[in-house]
Every structure is written in C-alpha cells, then in structure tokens.
Image (cartoon, helix red, strand yellow):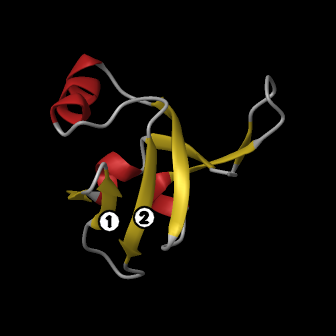
Amino acid sequence: MFRDKRTRRETNTLYHTGASQHVRIVDIIGGRGMRQHLSQLGIGIGDVIFIKRNAPFGGPILIEHNGTEIAIGRGVAERIIVEEETS
C-alpha cells in the first residue's frame, strides 16, 4: 500500500485490491509498451474500473470497464496503481 503525498489518499496495486470494488487508475508503472497494451484494451490513467474477480491463488484478474469484461494478467496488475473510488 502506498500513500500519495499530493492527495493524501491511499493507493494500492490492482493485484493487491480485493474483488467487488470500484477503483480509479492513478498510475501505470512501465514503459511505452505497457501503456500501449493497456491503451489498446481501453484502459488508461484516470479510468474507473470495477474489479469483478481477484482469485487468491493465481489466474487473471477480471475487471469491467465501460461494460466490457477484461482479464488482466497478474504481472500487469502489479504495475497498475489504483485508489478506491468514492462516489
């Protein structure tokens, strides 16, 4: 878990976030290829996503974004920094 010094909000990686939560993507740790891959999936910084399933023992993390279900691998999910969305 990280604390963003600018906003004083708690952040976490997508990998370490539980299921059934709405979260906002605040950063993507990776190079151009990582950002381009996620962009092709329609995912970017500032997007709000819903975590549908985060199985405890491996397998992809299933998210929903704009009505589309997307499976994110655990290696990629460790590089996506999110914060809990408060509505």
The residue lying furthest to the top in this view is: 32
State the separation of the CA atoms marked 2 and 1: 8 Å
Q: Which residue appears at 25% of the width and 73% of the height?
A: 59
Disc 1 target residue:
61
Q: Which residue appears at 31% of the width and 47% of the height?
A: 76
Nearer-the-camera pick, 72 or 40: 40
How many C-alpha atoms fall within 10 Å of the one at disc 1: few (<14), some, or many (≥20)?
A: many
Instruction: From the top left corner, tell me how far across and down residue 24 is, in percent.
Output: 54, 43
Three-letter residue code for mark 2 = Ile
Q: Which residue appears at 44% of the width and 37% of the height?
A: 47
The secondary element bearing badge 1 is classed as strand
Residue 82: quarter of image: top right
Q: In this view, does 28 lie above or below 3?
A: above
> Does 63 sit left or right of 12 as displayed?
left
Three-letter residue code for mark 1 = Ile
How many C-alpha atoms fall within 10 Å of the one at disc 2: few (<14), some, or many (≥20)?
A: many
Q: In this view, does 15 lie above or below 52?
A: above
Instruction: From the top left corner, tell me how far across and down residue 40 is, in percent.
Output: 15, 32
Nearer-the-camera pick, 36 or 56: 36
The secondary element bearing badge 2 is classed as strand
Disc 2 target residue:
51
